[in-house]
Image (tube, coloured by chain):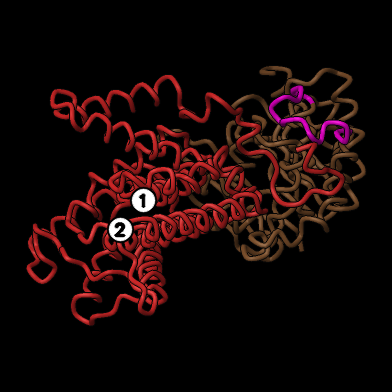
Amino acid sequence: MLGALLIAPFALNAFPQLITLFTNILILSILALSFDLCWGYSGIMSFGQALFFGVPAYVIALVGRDLGFSEIWGTLPLAMLIGLLLSFAFAMFLLLGRKTPTSIFIALGTLTGAYASERLVSGWQYVGAGNGLSSIKLLKLGSFEFVEGIAFYFLAFGCLLAVYLVSRYLIRSQMGLVLAGMRQNEERLAFFGYRVQLYKAVVFSFAGMIAGLAGALYSYHQGFIGPGNMGPGLSTMAVIYCLFGGSGTLIGAVLGTLSIEAISYVLADIDIIKRFWPVILGLVLLLVVAFQPSGILGLFVTNRERFFSYGWRPGRNRAER
Amino acid sequence: MALLEVKGVTKMFGALQALGGVDLSVQAGTFHGLIGPNGSGKSTLLKAIAGAHFPSTGTITFAGLDVTAALPFERARAGLSLKFQITAVLPELSVYDNVLLALQAGQSLWSLIRSKTRRAMHDKVLGALARFRLEGRADDLAGELSHGEQQWLEIAMALAPRPKLLLLDEPTGGMSPEERRVTGELLLPIKSECALVIVEHDLDFIKNICDHLTVLDQGKVLDSGTVDQIERSAKVQEVYTSRV
């Protein structure tokens, strides 16, 4: 998969619209991956993941418009910081109370946050109201500008790879073992002495930071950010990408995004299907949840292969794994 | 001073009174058995001590700390460890990882992110597994173990963080007579490491390993004392001959 993604832009050089499509898929994969960390690894049903995608995207668009600043070394870390702080603020409210929150409370809390923010920016003229912010300043590195095309593709690819590797490191660490335990029996872990909600808050905040990075890349790539990019619509898409590909796998989130976005692109020109696409998507998701809860990836690998061991273990080499 | 002091603990579930003013005192280094007919409140008391239920009234003091309102993770950090009545091993993790998970609970989050203590804990994990005859099953999934082995694994997990007080809720439930005998043999040596409060229906098993017994009936303490005293107790005999 890595090799295919590396050669894809060269193979598709004659079709710039496909490079744009694949760049978009890479960026949305980062968002899907951030949801996978929440749901697949920590049991947090974040129905507002787009909030942590949209708000940082708006901020860097405003920084470009009002301050004329769009240097990559400043704006991408800024977007990540905003995603981190915003999700941590939500975690403080939703996760770190004295009582263990229910899944429904968390799902509704994040959904409400995303919905309220979408409504807020829709009526706020300073941020373009319902029209959003367009003609966003191009992302720069010194005098080099990242325009749509191969350069932006590799930037998005590099970001996705970095996010994947850091996430993989986390879930394979001893902390990842705690997350795997939480996924199976949260109550049991509390009786070992783990403050389960703290672990959830850490993962949720980290996922928010990743979503912030995706949001910044998205707004620079599209040259536009609107209210719809921070509301329940995109949040639900992140859920669908992840569940379709296979939650709790990281790579499944990428696979799900790739499959759904590629199919959407192919079917976009067929009017009758285009009109019913959201309904078809909903039905596909229902079928996946009902009959293949481990997603597409679950067809090829077992749970044992998906999770397996955590951190270094003496006396076992890679071949044994 | 007693390691665990339970004073006047009541627990209401709606209109039902599960515990009606229970007192219990457990000294460090002793094995204390809780016995009584079904529905007498043994498991409810154990859960109140561990933090799974909060008492409606009364106080629980552990190692000098008032833990009445403490959450389970706070009690665990203070040195309380619980083995559930229904086995609660993590079935999709390996036997090795189940023990490691219990063992590393005292580590900081940052240390766990860096996997810093993995090497240092390896021998301890293998030691804990060997102690409960599970060294050959380290790489198997916990869900693949037999019922008896899962009970042993859970005791190994509960003991792994080196608690001051271990709470065992029916550790031999569903075991064969041979497995019960072995469990008794495996539990006796831990007396030098921690105190034990055990809920068990098998009276022969509990008499063989406990120093003290507390008999509960209808949510109240019927009698309490050494094994000999309880065996001679007329009140206890009456309850056991009439209802058990």
* Chain at numbered mark 2: A
Question: What residue is shown with label 2?
Answer: A148
Taking A105 as reference, is B212 left or right? Answer: right
Task: Name which residue type carries label 2.
Answer: Glu
Judge whether A297 appears above or below A129 on screen.
above
Assign a secondary structure to mark 2: loop
Distance between mark 2 and mark 1 Cα atoms: 9 Å
Which chain is rendered brown in the image? B
Question: What residue is shown with label 1?
Answer: A23
Taking A64 as reference, is A76 left or right? Answer: right
Which chain is rendered red in the image? A
Tell me residue B1's x, y (percent).
77, 64
**Is residue B20 visible to the viewer in this orientation of the structure?**
no
Q: Look at the numbered discs 2 and 1 and tell me whether their residues touch, using CB distance below 8 Å.
A: yes
Quadrant for residue B41, please give it: top right
User: Residues in magenta?
Assistant: B133-148
